[in-house]
Image (cartoon, rainbow, N blue to C red):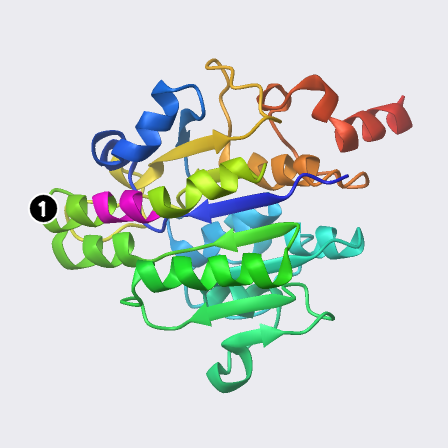
Amino acid sequence: MANKTILVVLDGLAYEAAEQCMGFLHALKEQGLATGYKMQCELPSMSRPLYETILTGVTPALSGIVNNQVARNSNQKSVFSLARQAGLTTAAAAFHWHSELYNCSPYDAVRDRHTQDPEQLIQYGCFYHGEHYADSYLYLDAESLRLRHDPDFLLIHPMNIDNAGHKSGIDSAHYRNTVRKSDIELSKYLPTWIDAGYQVLITADHGMNDDKSHGGTLSQERDIPFFVIGKSFSHQQNCAPKQTEICGLICELLEIQDHNKPMTENLLLKDQMIGRHYLNSVVS
């Protein structure tokens, strides 16, 4: 039986800000309920290309989603397409670029904002199209999708941290306090998800710089956090996960047996390596 999995992508969250400002997530670490890693995002350090990287395991230079203006369907196998192929249920509360990548492009707010279509890759969706859309509303959207549709895979993608960075820069009270508010929002829902047995991954697409932007190679722009919560993870501190391996990790958690996505195997307990074991046995 697949592990129900939640992926939270905190848009624009730099690693240093997560270390300094996310008290609840670090409380979970101190209690042994979560493990955190430092991860480097792929290039360019921009949102739409890295949504595609996170959800397909393919770098922007190879996926063709190389900037935020490339508005089309993904042509790669994604968590959503692989999950649907395996007969699993998918949902997302996320910025509308995800709808364009994996459902319908171009996005039509009237048609697509509230998606309930079993034939789509993202079957159940609540998509927003304003970067100022409140994170508190977004988490409510996500929890409503979870309770109504019980998806095997749920993507949650709030935007307020990135919005604060573009307005005030990484070294600002506005940015840091927005990170703290996001941590508080997570504290409202994570205990319920943990008690219900979900496997939870929390990360970012990219960081932020002092120029109130991102897209380049600065460590502020590329260094991002990666937290894992759940019984299926090994919680070994010496793992070095890559952004291109998140898709494969989720496929393993969902017990999708015919994927070929890369992943850092020691992130999971050995008895969780269902798909990878299957692939290795076929190759050998």
Q: Position of residue 260 (x, y in %)?
A: 74, 38
Magenta stretch holds residue 183: yes
Res 16 quadrant in image: top left
Q: Is residue 215 left or right of residue 111?
A: left
Res 184 quadrant in image: top left
Q: Residues within 10 Å of mark 1 (few under 14, many from 20)?
A: few
Quadrant occupied by the N terminus: top right
Q: Position of residue 163 (x, y in %)?
A: 25, 59
Q: Is residue 141 left or right of residue 278?
A: left
Quadrant occupied by the C terminus: top right
Residue 53, relative to residue 81: is it above or below? above
Res 64 quadrant in image: bottom right
User: At 65% from the left edge and 58% from the top edge, which residue is drawn?
Assistant: 90
Q: Which residue is mark 1?
A: 173
User: At 17% from the left edge and 43% from the top edge, which residue is drawn?
Assistant: 176
Q: Identify the amino acid type marked 1.
A: Ala
* Closest to the observer, 175 or 54: 175
Q: Position of residue 154 (x, y in %)?
A: 57, 53
User: At 68% from the left edge and 40% from the top edge, which residue is drawn?
Assistant: 251
User: At 66% from the left edge and 55% from the top edge, which residue is drawn?
Assistant: 80
Magenta-drawn segment: 180-185
**Outermost residue toward the bottom?**
110
Residue 249, relative to residue 133: is it above or below? above
Asked whether residue 76 appears in the rendered view, the answer is yes
Residue 241, relative to residue 48: is it above or below? above
Magenta stretch holds residue 84: no
Q: Name the element at disc 1.
A: helix
